[in-house]
Amino acid sequence: MATVVLAGGGTAGHIEPALAVARQWAAVHPHDRLIFLGTSSGLETTLVPGANFPLHLIPRVRISRTPSASWLKIPVDLLSSVRACSKVIKSSSAVVGFGGYVSAPAYIAAKLAGVPIVIHEANAKPGWANRLGAAFTDHLAVAHPVESGKFSSALLAGLPLRSDVAQGFVAAEKDWKKARTEAKKKLGFSENAPLVVIMGGSQGSVAINKVIESSLDVFNRKGVQVLHSVGKLNALPASTASYKAVSYIEAMADAYLAADLVIGRSGAVTCSEFRALGRYALFVPLPIGNGEQFVNAASLVADGRAQVITQKEFTAEYLENNLDALLQQSTKAMVEGNGADLHAAEKIASLTEFAMKA
């Protein structure tokens, strides 16, 4: 019986692909042990136990994006986190990392213990944790082609989809138009009016929320229905007959299928799920980081399924002037989704099997 440790915490962008791979591994190797690493402050504290996998908590290594006095604590915090990871990893068969602050100490602990490392990079621009881990292994997989560095020769696996999104694609293949109509009904919206779905990532976006709340009259005057995911940490606005505000969209597959237009961030998971089930999107990339969200959306823009604007450009005035045109573009987009990522979890699981035998 093998033990596989999965490292990827913080946001759904790191956790959901890891869960998809874990489910795939469990289906093929039902007697193996799967353990997730995470911290007490990430979404993994609910998503991982909710998927019936054990979670081992480690201390978080906090690294600010700009130099500060907190950087002086990094070596001590990192050592503490590596030690916590080692308790699980030293007797494991492989570590599969998905980036984020949980992955870096896991990669170091695995290297010190001589445990095989597999890394999946979801973004078109690899993050710092996965770049660190890539120095310790050749078993690399990516969701998008990477132009330079070690990840440029990685396995092009795609991005593992959540089970509901994958199942939604398979069901919708029978009749995409019917699937989109039925999804609107399931969410409680009329099939006779356009639906805009707003999502600011797994934790919501205050900036996007403010623009949407300032634009409710615009949506109302134009006869547009809205499903708005504000994020679990943000205040929940009052809903109306045509505007429904929720903390988090549980039925994401239905939301993608039902939406005539998606407005949101362009994180790797959002882009992958939208590619599978969505129709047309306006992406407002997160203005911090290394610019990966702009790159993530590039292929969807090239395919005529999305537009990208900066957060500074995204205003109530922009929506007033462009909403009609965006909805018109949606009617011109293909009604079918794209199943390119359907087998990504299988590919990463196979790479892990190879790493364990190498």
Image (cartoon, rainbow, N blue to C red):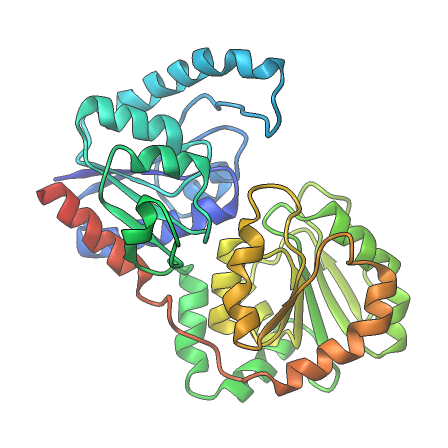
Residue 183 or residue 205, whichever sits in front: 205
In this view, 309 is above or below 135: below
Left or right of 275: which side holds 280? right
Residue 196 pos. (x, y %): 71, 70
> Residue at the location (82% across, 70% down)?
241
In this view, 12 is above or below 113: below
Residue 192 pos. (x, y %): 73, 87
Residue 174 or residue 122, whichever sits in front: 122
Q: Is residue 14 visible?
A: yes
Residue 195 pos. (x, y %): 71, 75
Quarter of the view holding residue 328: bottom right
> Residue at the location (39% across, 54% down)?
147
In this view, 24 is above or below 343: above
Q: Is residue 238 visible?
A: no
Left or right of 196: which side holds 166? left
Left or right of 48: which side holds 136? left
Q: How many marks?
A: 0
Left or right of 19: which side holds 28? left
The C terminus - image quarter: top left
The N terminus - image quarter: top left
In this view, 335 is above or below 231: below
Q: Residue furthest front?
A: 148
Residue 82 pos. (x, y %): 35, 20
Quarter of the view holding residue 344: bottom left
